[in-house]
Image: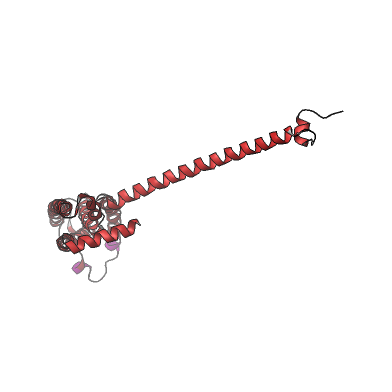
Amino acid sequence: GPVSGPARIAGGDEADPCPLEFVGERDGLGSGLLADGLGAVGATKSAWRERLLVWGDTLRTGLWPIPVLMGFGAFALHGVAAWLDRRVGEFRFPGAGWLLHSGSGQDAYVLLATLVGALVTVSSIVFSITIVTLTVAANQFGSRLVRTYMADPRTKLSLGLFVATVVYCLMAMRSFSHVTPPEQVPHVTVTLGLVLGVAGVLVLAFFLHNVGRSIVADEGVGRVYLGERFTL
C-alpha cells in the first residue's frame, strides 16, 4: 500500500514534492539557528576582548598598579632578608662586619624609623610633583594627553620604590625592638633597608630630571607619537 506519515518524508517520494520541500525548510531553519548561535558567540568574544583592552589600558595608564605590586613585593623581600639573617647568624663570612649593619637594637630601630619618616615625606613630594606635571601637560598639550604622561613607567617605578621601601622598613621594625642585643639584631634586614633608602635618594634625582624633561615640547610630542604607535 502507499507509504504515509514520517516514512514518506524520510523517503522523499518523487510523486509528492512536499516532503522534500519540508526537509529543505527544516535544513534552512537549522542553518539559520546555527548561524545565529555562532554570531552570538562571536559577539560575546568581541565584547570580552574589548573589556580586556579597556582594563589593560586602565592598568597601563594608571599610577597605582606598579606601586601596589612593588609594595606587596616588599613583604617577599623582607622574608628573604629574614632567611638570610638566619643563615648569616649560623655561618659568618669574612667581611660581614664591614658590609652589614653591626649596631645595637636601638641604633637599627632609629635608623629604620628615620628612613620611614624621610621616605614618607619624599613620597608626598613626588606625588605633588607628579600632579603639577600633569597639570602643566594638560595646559600645554591638552587634557587628552594626560593619560600619555600617566603611562610613563619611570614615574610609577619611582613611586613604587618609595612605597616598597616604606613597607619594607615597617616590616623590619616589627622584627626587633630598642632593647634587642646586637647579636640578635637582624643585621641583613637593616642593611637592606639602608640600601633601599640610598637607592631612593638616587631615584629621586632621576625622577626630578625626568620631570624637567617631560614638560618640554619636543618630549611631549615624542610621548604622543609613542602612545599613538602603541595604540595602533
Horizontal side of 8 relative to 187 (left or right) equals right
Horizontal side of 223 relative to 35 (left or right) equals left
Residue 10 image offset from top left, x and y in percent: 75, 35
- For the residue pair 173 and 231, the one nearer the viewer reads as 231
Horizontal side of 114 relative to 72 (left or right) equals left
Q: Which residues are magenta?
A: 87-98
- State the quadrant of the N terminus: top right
Give the quarter of the image for residue 161. bottom left
Residue 171 image offset from top left, x and y in percent: 23, 50
Q: What count of labels does the image hold?
A: 0
Horizontal side of 32 relative to 80 (left or right) equals right
Residue 146 image offset from top left, x and y in percent: 22, 52
Above-or-below relation of 170 to 94 = above
Direction bottom: furthest residue: 94
- For the residue pair 97 and 126, the one nearer the viewer reads as 126
- State the quadrant of the C terminus: bottom left
- For the residue pair 89 and 141, the one nearer the viewer reads as 141
In the rendered structure, does residue 92 fall within the stretch colored magenta? Answer: yes
